[in-house]
Image (spheres, rainbow, N blue to C red):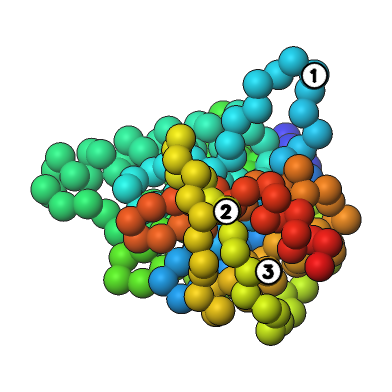
Amino acid sequence: MSYTEALNVFSPDGRLIQVEYAHHASEQGSLITANVTTGAVIICIEKKTAIKNLISKSKLLKVAENIYFSYSGLASDAQTIFTRLSLFYHNYKIETDTYPDISLLAMELGVIKFKYTIEGGKRPFGVRSILVGFDDKPRVFIIEPDGNYGEYNNATLGYKNDKVEFNKVEVQNKHVTLHKKDETISSDLTNVVYNDLFMTVKSMSDAIKIDHKRIECFIVTKENCYLVSEDTIKDIINE
């Protein structure tokens, strides 16, 4: 088996080609931008152009009460690792009578991915994953296809993530509309949170020139996860 096909055979210049292919696959998916702000995490996810008659689903998946998962790359791979992560979360609770925190979940997700880069009969997952949530503070982790992971204050992954620029802004605070399950909430955010919301949305729209209807934006707090309304996103993009 050549080094271009084998998982654990280095190429002559010291590369693991299959792992590089997995990284490449993960960069073809939806653009995601995330930002840690005061008491919350703001995350924007690009909605790919929908197939006609297909019922679309949110790409922000709930792991636990205050921890969420999203991804860029192959959807089937993402579903597999999300299922494994959820099983780990619940089994950990059964075995220890405590819940794993977000940093432990990031580490476990890294272990799951790493095993698929070295075990025979498997291939690396073509997915970059992001975990957002809380322990004692808001946190964001990115987990690479090879199992490496790190914590970020500003995070990007997916298509054209290298074009994203987080530019701090000072804009006039405006009224926003948020959705929580079937409830619509009119809210006035703090200046800091609104400015960070503005920055996170703008960083995505400026990078890929996207319509407001193709951005899913969430504000994740310790107690709730709020979906930002399309009208609020439209106002930010047009400002």
Q: Quadrant of residue 238?
A: bottom right
Q: Identify the disc placed on residue 17.
A: none
Query: Which of the two labelled residues, at mark 3 and mark 2, occupies the earlier sequence position?
Result: 2
The residue at which mark 2 appears reads as 177
| Residue 238 shows up from this direction | yes
Residue found at x 38% / y 52%: 224
Q: Quadrant of the C terminus?
A: bottom right
Q: Tell me which amino acid carries mark 2.
A: Thr
Drawn side of residue 145 relative to residue 99, left or right: right
Q: Please state which of the two labelled residues, at mark 3 or mark 1, is closer to the viewer.
A: 3
Q: Identify the disc placed on residue 198.
A: 3
User: Nearest the camera: 103 or 188?
Assistant: 188
Asked if the residue under mark 2 is in contact with the one under mark 1, i.e. CB atoms within 8 Å, the reply is: no
Estimate the x, y position of residue 5 in percent, counting from the top left.
74, 37
The residue at which mark 1 appears reads as 52
Q: Tell me which amino acid carries mark 1.
A: Lys
Q: Tell me which amino acid carries mark 3.
A: Phe
Residue found at x 69% / y 71%: 199
- Decide: few, some or many residues near mark 1? Use Cα within 10 Å; few <14, some 14-19, many ≥20: few
Distance in Å between CA atoms under marks 1 and 2: 28 Å
Residue found at x 22% / y 45%: 92
Query: Which of the two labelled residues, at mark 1 and mark 2, occupies the earlier sequence position?
Result: 1
